[in-house]
Amino acid sequence: MRRGMDTYRLKTDIITHDKQILLPAGTEITDAVLRDVIAPNKNRHYKSSSLMHHESIRTDLSYCVSHPPYQWIFSLGDEYRDLMKLLEKTRLIQPVLETLDLLKSYDIYTYRHTLTVFTLSTLVATYLIDNYRDLMSEAVSSPSHDIGKIGVPLEILRKATPLTRNELDMLEQHPVSGCVLLNYYYGDTGNISALVARDHHEKKNGSGYPYGIHLDNPIAEIVVVCDIYDALISHRPYRPVPYDNRTALEELTAMAHRKEINMDAVKALVALNRKDKPDYRDCKLSDDKRGIPPKMNNYRIIVGEDTGD
Ligand SMILES: [Fe+2]
Ligand SMILES: [Fe+2]
């Protein structure tokens, strides 16, 4: 997997959990800049603690997975107990835990989304990646994938009408901000959490953002699929109603057929949504589109675009 950063000019400051400006707006991020940023933290080792025992995380996570469709998805009997035991192994360093606390008071949607994507992507990873249970302590990256959103102004995160170009640019910086912050906190540019934060809006065919790379990393690809699924079926400010579950799965299937996202991860979600929970490898994904996407969806629509002005 690609390490480091292609050049990217910051639209807005990157601010740490303790309110320091790590990099100001206008900075051109290059590998050299990144090395300078992490240099002071190279030999600093933050204490790590259990995510599930931190503040109200366990209760909040149970709340997130107690509503449809998650209550069906996680109707797994003993397998759900195993999953919870696996999640118990997750340890995160102090600044990341503190950022999750900040996120809870700043933007409850992103906080709950983070916990949901963490739970779902861990489950999917146990199906798709050999030895994921053993890799878990090294590879867990989903709880921090959106921590860069802490630097996005709330009026942008909550805006119901289309964004301006500048607002969209500020929003779409969050993967870069998250990556820089995680590089800084871990004192390491190869940290898997930072790479997943950077790439969680990229696509396999290069049609994503912020860099438009061809995503090729199994862990990031699972987070991408779970991230899109949760965003589609959740209430979001930019559209009046969420996608219904069936339409969301059809949307993901179409994206997988267009080679934007990982087909096996989509199959795993489809299998989890079935009552008998078949093996994902036995799931056939049909191209049929019977669902109706919500109207008036302002996702990634820019004010003034397509007006012919
Ligand atoms: Fe994101
Ligand atoms: Fe996300």
Image: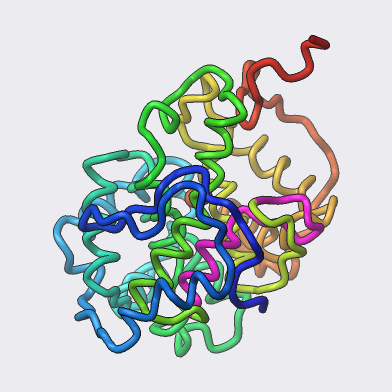
Vertical placement of 262 versus 301: above or below? below
Q: Residue at x 65, y 73 (%)?
A: 218
Applied colour scheme: rainbow
Whether 303 is among the magenta residues is no
Residue 187, horizontal then vertical, whole percent: 38, 80
Q: Nearer the viewer, residue 240 or 298?
A: 298
Q: In the picture, which quadrant includes the N terminus?
A: bottom right
Q: Residue at x 66, y 69 (%)?
A: 279
Q: Nearer the viewer, residue 125 or 70?
A: 125
Q: In the picture, which quadrant includes the C terminus?
A: top right
Q: Quadrant of residue 51?
A: bottom left
Residue 172, horizontal then vertical, whole percent: 56, 44
Q: Nearer the viewer, residue 157 or 264?
A: 157
Q: Which residues are magenta?
A: 191-209
Number of marks: 0
Residue 270, horizontal then vertical, whole percent: 65, 54
Q: Residue at x 39, y 83 (%)?
A: 137
Q: Residue at x 83, y 11 (%)?
A: 308
Whether 204 is among the magenta residues is yes
> Is residue 276 among what the camera can see?
no
Q: Quadrant of residue 246?
A: top right
Vertical placement of 93 versus 107: above or below? below
Q: Quadrant of residue 294?
A: top right
- On the picture, is 275 further left or further right than 107? right
Q: Nearer the viewer, residue 66 or 181?
A: 181
